[in-house]
Image (tube, rainbow, N blue to C red):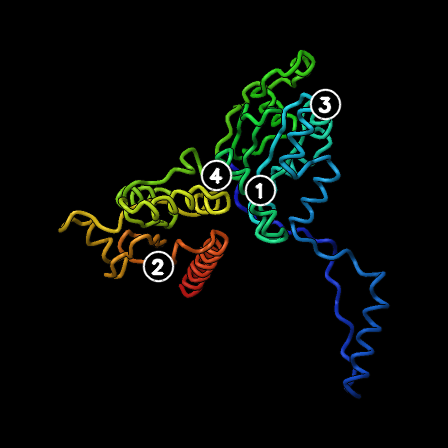
Amino acid sequence: MVLAHTQAEMIGGPAASLPPRQPACSGRLSLGMLLLSVALLAPALPPLVRLQPAAASEHAQASSWLTSYEEALAAAQRSGRPVLTVFTGSDWCPHCKTLEENVLFTETFREWADAHVVLLMIDLPQAGISQAVRSERSQVCIKYGVRTFPSVLVIGPDGSKLAAQTGYTGQSAAAWIGAIAEKMPAVTSQTASVRPANPPGLATAAVPVGGEDAGTVCESLDDAVEKSRGTKRPILLVVSRPGDKRATTHTASLINHPEFAPFVHDHFVVAQVAPEAPSGSETAQSMENLLGGVELPSEAVELIVTEDGQTPLFSQSGGQPPARIVNGLRRFLAARQAARFGEAARR
């Protein structure tokens, strides 16, 4: 069973209360009192709340995780061991966080990894890293075609992909290690002999977040509507002209982007469609409604959210940076959820 989406928070301790408000004698005195209070309280305050990326980074350092692809390959070439590479979104992907807590940051995993692999973590959080680092890590995702988070790749010292596993289905650390070890080629006789056995009855194939068809892109509006009825998820249409080379290239890049792809496939039914259909058809009328009767400009990519394939609920340009697009879609989902809670409360 795939674990449910639950948003966990990394909290360092109970919230500290602000000092009682002092009577207003003067602006200077109030500021002085406030600074003095903060200075006196600082040693006793609990640890500050940490963003998940910082916490993940600390775990990575403590567990010998590398964060540079080039450094990991160099270490693999020196040791002859493969690189176990984990692709994660530490502050937005709940399944990634669960995998880290249940497996990757456990003593059982650390002992196994120290003897068998070089560890590499490619973390793409929403915040907490520079644009240069984000670009560097995104290139690794693109290089190996990673579209689902979490994903785990076993990479050879020469950079070749030896094995892959996507998603996390809730296994214990020992079971997860057994599943991934079965997919690893025997680099040496020593590593082959110490591979942990896979527990009886445990499926070795992981199921991507969202089900077996997660990551698929519908090729028609009708297919997307049908799939949406079964999953109860809204539809995200990526609209571009098929004969427009620049728009087609941009659409493919966006749909496969390591930040955009896992997020939209986890929350939407995704379809790539043309802005026009045969005249007089139902699809033609639907697309006219969804685009508001406006002709899609050349080289443009438009993103439209709908639930029934007829009514647009949200739209934005696909020409924006993927991170900005994802933020816009997050705001839409939050507003949609709030509206549903409001309707339920009025009943």
Q: Position of residue 160 (x, y in %)?
A: 55, 25
Residue type at mark 1 is Arg
Q: Nearer the viewer, residue 298 or 192?
A: 298
Question: Mark 1 and 3 residues: CB-CB less than 8 Å, in contact?
Answer: no
Compare marks 1 and 4 and give the one earlier in the sequence: 1
Residue type at mark 4 is Arg
> In front: mark 3 or mark 2?
3
Relative to 266, 272 lies left or right: left
Q: Nearer the viewer, residue 150 or 189?
A: 189
Mark 1: few/some/many CA within 10 Å (<14, 14-19, 20+): many
Q: Residue at x 36, y 53 (%)?
A: 303
Q: Residue at x 35, y 47 (%)?
A: 246
Say which element carries label 3. Answer: helix
Tell me the CA gap for discs 1 and 4: 13 Å
What's the mark number on residue 137? 1
Compare marks 2 and 4 and give the one earlier in the sequence: 4
Residue type at mark 2 is Leu
Mark 4: few/some/many CA within 10 Å (<14, 14-19, 20+): many
For label 2, the residue is 313
Q: Quadrant of residue 199?
A: top right
Say which element carries label 4. Answer: loop
Relative to 108, 320 lies left or right: left
Mark 3: few/some/many CA within 10 Å (<14, 14-19, 20+): few
Question: Mark 3 and 4 residues: CB-CB less than 8 Å, in contact?
Answer: no
For label 3, the residue is 115
Q: Quadrant of residue 104?
A: top right
For label 4, the residue is 147
Compare marks 3 and 4 and give the one earlier in the sequence: 3
Q: Nearer the viewer, residue 159 or 104?
A: 159
Q: Residue furthest left?
A: 280
Q: Residue furthest front?
A: 246
